[in-house]
Amino acid sequence: MTDNRIPLAGVIGHPVAHSRSPKLHGYWLKTLELPGFYVPMDVTPADFKTVVRALPKAGFVGANVTVPHKETAMHLADHVSDRASVIGAANTLVFRDDGSIHADNTDGYGFIENLRSGAPDWNPQDGPAVVFGAGGAARAVLSALSDAGVPEIILTNRTRSRADHLKEEFGQRIRVVDWVQAGNVIESAELVVNTTSLGMQGQPELRVPLDGLQPGAVVTDLVYAPLKTRLLRQAEDAGCTTVDGLGMLLHQAVPGFERWFGIRPVVDAATRAAALA
Ligand code: ATR
């Protein structure tokens, strides 16, 4: 900012009341003793562009963007990072001093950082990953796994055409299998990722048969409410390393916070507790 106003940031969604981001960023601002505020903003799709364009004038240095605005946010920006454009959606906006808007997507980064810290022995090159789901969250995961060098990604989704479409976009390393076959490919997996909403509070359970899970595999769920999903419980029982989805939320927030407020925050046990409070 060119003036000395207190920097503001926030998360824009519709709805947004469930978001953990205000607690998380508020915790970092407080513990790092930085001036600034981070607020939830419930904005309808009809108002989104108008609101975003006005925010810098009110002292906002940037914003996170969540459902249903992530695609619009990318299209509205003046500059789009490569990773946001590959994913086709943005979750982090930076309002620059010259009035332009920069869009980034840190979901894939958050996903990989969470895996690296929760399963430090996982080596992407070691073998196939099985990914459940082909929605927006899957796009970030596929792009991150490809970049990390996973040799084969076995993708399965209830609606097969969506998975086929992602294969066309994200390349040859993806093999699509039918949803009813999901249980049969688990055996070969070094990594299993749930990107669907199944298992989330208020949603049906993920019913893929998991008998084939190998004890050495790493299993992670993007669902973080509940923290320990049925998938993670079953994986634990099978002797797998499990990584819950809250860490992805925490890690994806790091680059935005650093850009807006000038200090790179750390993700540790206290950060987790603050986001859950
Ligand atoms: P997000 O952006 O969070 O990924 P999304 O684009 O709505 O959200 O995708 C939700 C994912 O959960 C999809 O893979 C969806 O499968 P479909 O593509 O077949 O819709 C999956 N999903 C949601 N409810 C499901 C259910 N009852 N059974 C199987 N898959 C389900």
Image (cartoon, rainbow, N blue to C red):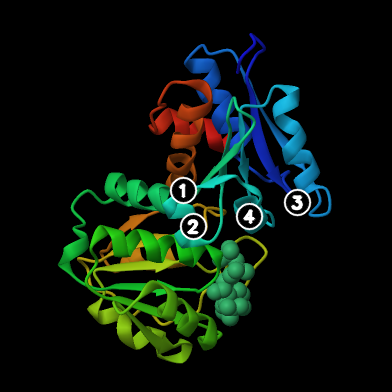
The residue that mark 4 highlights is 75
Which residue appears at 67% of the width and 26% of the height?
Answer: 60
**Would you place residue 43 above or below residue 189 in this image?**
above
Which residue appears at 52% of the width and 53% of the height?
Answer: 224
> If you read the primary sequence from the N terminus, does the residue marked by circle 4 or circle 3 appear first?
3
> If you read the primary sequence from the N terminus, does the residue marked by circle 1 or circle 3 appear first?
3
The residue that mark 1 highlights is 81
Q: Which amino acid does the dot numbered 2 rest on?
A: Ser
Which of discs 3 and 2 lies nearer the camera? The answer is: 2
Give neighbour class at mark 4: few <14, some 14-19, many 20+ (Cα, 10 Å): some
Asked if ligand 1 lies within 8 A of label 1, the reply is no
> If you read the primary sequence from the N terminus, does the residue marked by circle 1 or circle 4 appear first?
4
The residue that mark 3 highlights is 14
Q: Nearer the viewer, residue 158 or 170?
A: 170
Which residue appears at 58% of the width and 29% of the height?
Answer: 96
Q: Secondary structure at mark 1?
A: loop
Q: Secondary structure at mark 4?
A: helix
Give neighbour class at mark 3: few <14, some 14-19, many 20+ (Cα, 10 Å): some
Find residue 85 and name its label.
Answer: 2
Q: Position of residue 208 (x, y in %)?
A: 45, 81
**Residue at mark 3 to residue at mark 2: CA–CA distance:** 22 Å
Give neighbour class at mark 1: few <14, some 14-19, many 20+ (Cα, 10 Å): some
**Would you place residue 98 above or below residue 81 in this image?**
above
Which residue appears at 64% of the width and 8% of the height?
Answer: 4
Q: Which amino acid does the dot numbered 3 rest on?
A: His
